[in-house]
């Protein structure tokens, strides 16, 4: 790939970033009441403009259907009045959350009388690069506003028309309330525009990629703006030898089939050899009955009941985030083997164990290196809304600043305020 970016594209992105920077200065000074009122107005605007957005989204859907894109991507892209109502409700939920800006993280009075305190402040200008999930457009705008940040949104081309309609609604709403429309900017254009955003160091404070592994890797590799890495989800559920098997069947089904296109859906099922013969026949039948394509190791294939197709699982299968009704299955000798498998293939997103053994649960939570670790619960709970954070900006799998579902606190940094009475050093 050429490293050259057209000068006109660079100039456009830099101007967009300067406008966002100016808007961010105004947002940083808003009271919580002002921000919450704007969020509620934005929610109303999304619902009032639902028909306009749905019509734009239909244009996107028609285009991706013509291209024959996978059903999982089409599901992520689709907007209807019910989903838009959910998006609006997420904005209203954000309005109820505490404002992290100005929150005192810690403070003290030194022996010399200086009063010091560390307080939350906005990051400034946040760039979001994401794929075909138009809900992210509104979630990101709402979280950025509440945390006092301006946001530059770079959505995938598959959601182009829906994103444009949503951003137009949000900007119109902000202007009507006397707030800077450039608090929410949409970056369009080809890949050079995204690359120029990644190189707008000094104008953009941080970039958050949200999407598949290839997108995230590209942003991490090419950006000279600091990146908060949100990770892909090669998610596992391990059914331990001491599992309640009825509970395990419900958790596996929910983790895989409730919404298979999202990053917290399970992609691999690990079953302890001690319960494999008892558990797998019914579990595989349930999954196949729900339309799940199954890839299994030799022990799994041997346990499959008549009429349930399980093809041979390869290294690639175990290393794949399917984003679809597709799952890898393996029988492991014990918890040590399960831990070793997860360490080898996990992307550090969410890992679940089903067990009635407190000792096994403690080992799992202590030894698994992931942003979220589940015990006897569906992997689908790794979500900002489910955690009570309101809408999320993404799920971070890195270890600096933010990890797990990223909401308002993760969109702030801190500064130190020192107050004295003439002290000198």
Image (tube, grey):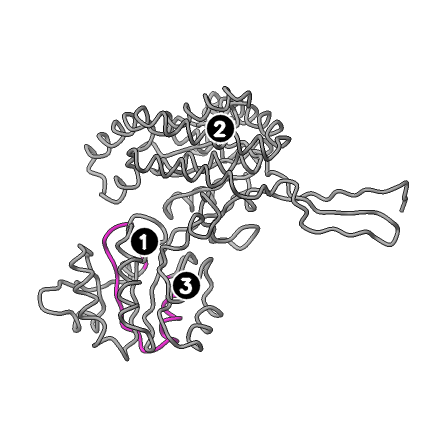
Q: Which mark is residue 321?
A: 1
Number of numbered discs overlaid on the protein picture: 3
At a point 90% along the width and 40% down the height, the residue shown is 422
Counting other residues with Cα less than 10 Å from the Cα at mark 1, is it few (<14), some (14-19), or many (20 or more)?
many
Residue 23, image x, y percentages: 57, 26
Asked which quadrant contains residue 236, the reply is bottom left
At a point 68% along the width and 47% down the height, the residue shown is 104
**Is there a contact, CB below 8 Å, between mark 1 and mark 2?**
no
Q: Is residue 322 magenta?
A: yes
Label 2: element kind: strand
Task: Give the alpha-carbon distance from disc 2 to disc 3, as whole Å.
Answer: 35 Å
Task: Give the alpha-carbon distance from disc 1 to disc 2, as whole Å.
Answer: 31 Å
Label 1: element kind: loop
Q: Above or below — where is 214 with respect to 271?
A: above
Residue 190, image x, y percentages: 38, 28
Q: Which residue is mark 2?
A: 184
Counting other residues with Cα less than 10 Å from the Cα at mark 2, is it few (<14), some (14-19), or many (20 or more)?
many
Q: Which residue is mark 3?
A: 374
- Earlier sequence position, callout 1 versus callout 2: 2
Asked which quadrant contains residue 266, the reply is bottom left
At a point 22% along the width and 43% down the height, the residue shown is 71
Q: Above or below — where is 78 with respect to 287?
A: above
In front of the other: 40 or 406: 40
Farthest-out residue, left? 307
Q: Above or below — where is 131 with respect to 172?
A: below
Residue 97, image x, y percentages: 53, 43
Disc nearest the viewer among 3 and 1: 3
Left or right of 251? Residue 392 is: right
Left or right of 317? Residue 204 is: right
Task: Give the alpha-carbon distance from disc 3 to disc 1, as whole Å.
Answer: 19 Å
Q: Is residue 99 magenta?
A: no
At a point 25% along the width and 29% down the height, the residue shown is 58
């Amino acid at each position: 790939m050429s490293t050259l970016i057209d000068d006109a594209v660079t100039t456009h992105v830099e101007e967009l970033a300067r406008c966002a920077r100016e808007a961010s200065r105004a947002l940083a000074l808003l009271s919580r009441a002002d921000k919450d009122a704007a969020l509620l107005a934005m929610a109303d605007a999304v619902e009032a403009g639902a028909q306009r957005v749905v019509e734009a989204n239909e244009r996107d859907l028609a285009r991706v259907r013509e291209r024959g894109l996978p059903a999982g991507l089409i599901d992520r892209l689709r907007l209807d009045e019910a989903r838009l109502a959910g998006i609006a409700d997420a904005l209203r939920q954000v309005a109820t959350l505490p404002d992290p800006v100005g929150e005192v993280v810690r403070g003290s009075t030194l022996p010399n009388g200086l009063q010091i305190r560390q307080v939350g402040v906005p990051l400034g200008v946040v760039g979001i690069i994401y794929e075909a999930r138009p809900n992210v457009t509104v979630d990101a705008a709402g979280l950025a506003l509440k945390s006092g940040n301006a946001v530059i949104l770079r959505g995938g081309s598959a959601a182009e028309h829906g994103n444009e309609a949503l951003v137009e609604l949000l900007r119109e709403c902000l202007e009507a309330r006397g707030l800077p429309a450039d608090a929410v900017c949409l970056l369009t254009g080809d890949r050079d525009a995204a690359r120029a955003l990644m190189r707008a160091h000094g104008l953009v404070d941080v970039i958050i990629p949200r999407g598949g592994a290839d997108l995230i890797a590209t942003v991490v590799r090419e950006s000279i703006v600091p990146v908060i890495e949100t990770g892909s989800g090669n998610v596992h559920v391990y059914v331990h030898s001491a599992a309640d098997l009825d509970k395990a069947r419900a958790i596996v089904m929910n983790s895989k089939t409730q919404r298979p296109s999202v990053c917290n859906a399970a992609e691999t099922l690990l079953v302890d050899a001690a319960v494999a013969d008892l558990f797998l026949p019914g579990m595989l039948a349930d999954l196949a009955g729900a339309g799940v394509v199954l890839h299994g190791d030799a022990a799994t294939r041997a346990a499959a009941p008549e009429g349930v197709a399980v093809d041979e699982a390869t290294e690639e299968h175990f290393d794949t985030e399917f984003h679809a009704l597709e799952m890898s299955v393996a029988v492991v000798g014990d918890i040590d083997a399960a831990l070793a498998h997860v360490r080898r293939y996990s992307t550090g997103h969410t890992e679940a164990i089903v067990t009635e053994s407190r000792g096994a649960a403690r080992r799992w939570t202590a030894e698994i290196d992931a942003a979220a670790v589940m015990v006897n619960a569906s992997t689908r709970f790794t979500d900002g809304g489910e955690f009570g954070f309101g809408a999320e900006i993404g799920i971070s799998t890195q270890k600096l600043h933010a990890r797990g579902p990223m909401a308002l606190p993760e969109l702030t940094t801190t500064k130190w305020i020192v107050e004295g009475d003439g002290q000198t050093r």
